[in-house]
Image (cartoon, helix red, strand yellow):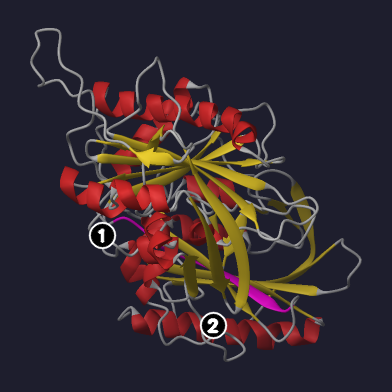
Amino acid sequence: MMSVRGVETVTFRVGTKSRRRVACAVVSLVALAGCSSGGGTPGATSPGGTPTATTTAPPASSSGSPAATGFPEAVFTDQELATIINGVAQNRNVQFPAAQDSERQRSGAASGSFPQVSTQATPSECIAFVPEHPFVRWVDKSVNFAEGVMPIGAQSGPTTTIMVTLRSAEKDAIAKADFGYTDDLASRCSQFDLASTESGRSSTYALQLLPAPLVGGKPLGEKQYGLMQTTKPKGPGDFGLVGLRVLAGTVSVTLSLSVAVLNSESDAKAALDSMAGVARELIDLAVTKPPTVVPPPSNSRTADELVALFKGVTGPDGSPVALPGASVIGSAPGFSAAPSPQGPVPPCTFSDSAYYGSLLGSVRGQGQIQGATKLDYTEFSVINMPTAAAPPYPFDTRAAALRDCTTVREDILGGGSREWSAVSQLNTTIAADSSYAVAYQLSDGTGEWHVRAGARKEMLSVEANTRTSSQDEARATADRLAAFFGSVFSNAGL
């Protein structure tokens, strides 16, 4: 997993032993989870062995009528597409949400904090087969999307995890957006090169279109094609990437899988076959069990609006702040997790899992403010509770639980715990309805002091934590965090 300024995304590392990596989907058909764009359909092969584009006619019904197409006809929302991915994952006994709500990616792209990326194909016309960069695609609300992962092995890793993207729009619109090519162009672009530049760093790749596998002797959709990508020049330990794209009615499916050894089409066959099975399940579920999604609770701020609160805000050290995305807490559409036992949190315990569990339906974003050095940074989070939230608010309960504690056990999100020692309350003035500010140390041998503070005004709360070299500096650090909170509240009109 890679975090782009707080936004979780998934990338393939093309060279896990070298320092090369696939830079988002711009360098392949899905280097970053679910990047997609125009594509071709080399579903057949010409006498010379060159893949050529094909279009599959809809299958006729048993009565001879062509009415039953077997492909989705409805336009699915972002959440409905995530529900389809999670439905297939649960059918495959995946124990975690395979897809989350797309609001984090969409709001993150709208924040303007992502790096600039450019791509160039050789021949240039073959750019039609290069997926649109996700930071651009996530902003586009004319096409709905969801992204996720689908494990195909006992252990998680790039060669055992399929990256999944579903996109949906009216049939003609999705065909033009993701399969806007001619058969002749697919033939001319059977092999081409790609150069990708991200934040001034360039990488080059060789791409080859491949025939898509059949499932049950039939094509997967109305159009489909495979793709094989390798680094150019290829270095020791570089992984390759195999992709599969399918157009089925109102849905576009884009899948990819890393392959350790990728020298020929035969090396790509197993990956294509695995992805074809997943594509078939996704399309079948969209047709046979169209998803229904319960809308999230009413909230006074959307994810985009939460991100916008940080425009023009500076951090504790005066540097600009950007919130790189927000989403609804607990929003994994279509995923039914086994209930976990819930009980009261013991006194002097700081538990993010329990805290977020009490804020389901809230809109939340998190980010990091980088300081002068790599190890100098401030982490922050912001939460806007649903309109229906009522006292006692979870933030107030958390703040009260930290008072009069000289030691605190922190339950780390995702598992594990650690002790805060020498906990002291910081007499910091924070203009808010509720707040806290504490300093503490960890038993890590560094001697550093940690400062954690938070504040709530009405339905909006902001929290941050950072480090300082001495206890004497803790109060000044907390004061700077308080000023940061005040700027956010001011932007929110509070």
Quarter of the image where one finds residue 214: top left
Residue lying at 57% horizontally and 92% vertically, measured from the top left: 318
Helix, strand or loop status at disc 1: loop
Marks 2 and 1, how far apart at CA: 36 Å
The image quadrant of residue 82 is top left
- Answer above or below: position of 81 versus 62: below
Q: In the drawing, does residue 412 fall left or right of residue 254?
A: right
Q: Is residue 342 above or below residue 330?
A: above
Stretch in magenta: 376-386
Tell which of 389 and 68 is nearer to you.
Answer: 68
Residue displayed at 38% across by 46% down: 146
- Looking at numbered disc 2 in the image, what kind of residue is underneath it? Ala
Percent across and percent down for residue 414 are 65, 45
**Would residue 402 be found to the left or right of residue 60 on screen?**
right
* Amino acid identity at mark 1: Lys
Q: Quadrant of the C terminus?
A: bottom left
The mark lying in front, picked from 2 and 1, is 1
> For the residue carrying disc 1, how many other residues have a C-alpha within 10 Å: few (<14), some (14-19), or many (20+)?
few
Residue at 74%, 77% in the rendered image: 374
Residue picked out by circle 1: 141
User: Tag on residue 482?
Assistant: 2
Q: Main secondary structure of the magenta part?
A: strand
Q: Residue furthest top?
A: 62
Q: Tell me the SS state at disc 2.
A: helix
Horizontally, residue 3 falls left or right of residue 36, namely right
